[in-house]
Image (cartoon, rainbow, N blue to C red):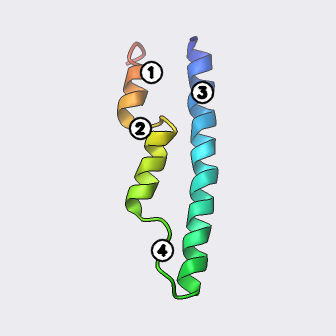
Amino acid sequence: MTEEQKTAFVFSAAVRALIRSQGMMALNVERQNLGQTLAYDEEAFVNLINEEGIDHNTMLSLFHDIV
């Protein structure tokens, strides 16, 4: 994979994570306004980063030759 392809891969994963996290936050706000418990906690947001493969260790592995 070229450096440009790696960058595009990471960028698209970050956008997916952002879209998903916005939905998660919206549901949390809705549930909070209804007096319900939150649907997503901190662990769910951390898991989202891992699921999309944009965690620290993955980035180091992907771009190890740049540093």
Secondary element under disc 3, as helix, strand or loop, is helix
Instruction: Give the percent coordinates (x, y) of residue 61.
Output: 38, 21
Whether pointer 1 and pointer 3 mark residues with C-beta atoms closer than 8 Å, the reply is: yes
Whether pointer 4 and pointer 2 mark residues with C-beta atoms closer than 8 Å, the reply is: no
The residue at which mark 3 appears reads as: 9
First in residue order: circle 1 vs circle 2: 2
First in residue order: circle 4 vs circle 1: 4
Say which amino acid is labelled 3. Phe
Say which amino acid is labelled 2. Asp
Mark 1–mark 3 distance (CA, rounded to whole Å): 10 Å
Mark 4–mark 2 distance (CA, rounded to whole Å): 24 Å
The residue carrying pointer 2 sits among few (fewer than 14), some (14 to 19) or many (20 or more) residues within 10 Å by Cα, namely some
Secondary element under disc 4, as helix, strand or loop, is loop
Secondary element under disc 1, as helix, strand or loop, is helix
The residue at which mark 1 appears reads as: 62
The residue at which mark 2 appears reads as: 55
Residue 43 vs 6, above or below: the answer is: below
Q: Quadrant of the N terminus?
A: top right
Q: Nearer the viewer, mark 3 or mark 4?
A: 4
Q: Is residue 11 left or right of residue 38?
A: right
Instruction: Give the percent coordinates (x, y) of residue 54.
Output: 47, 36
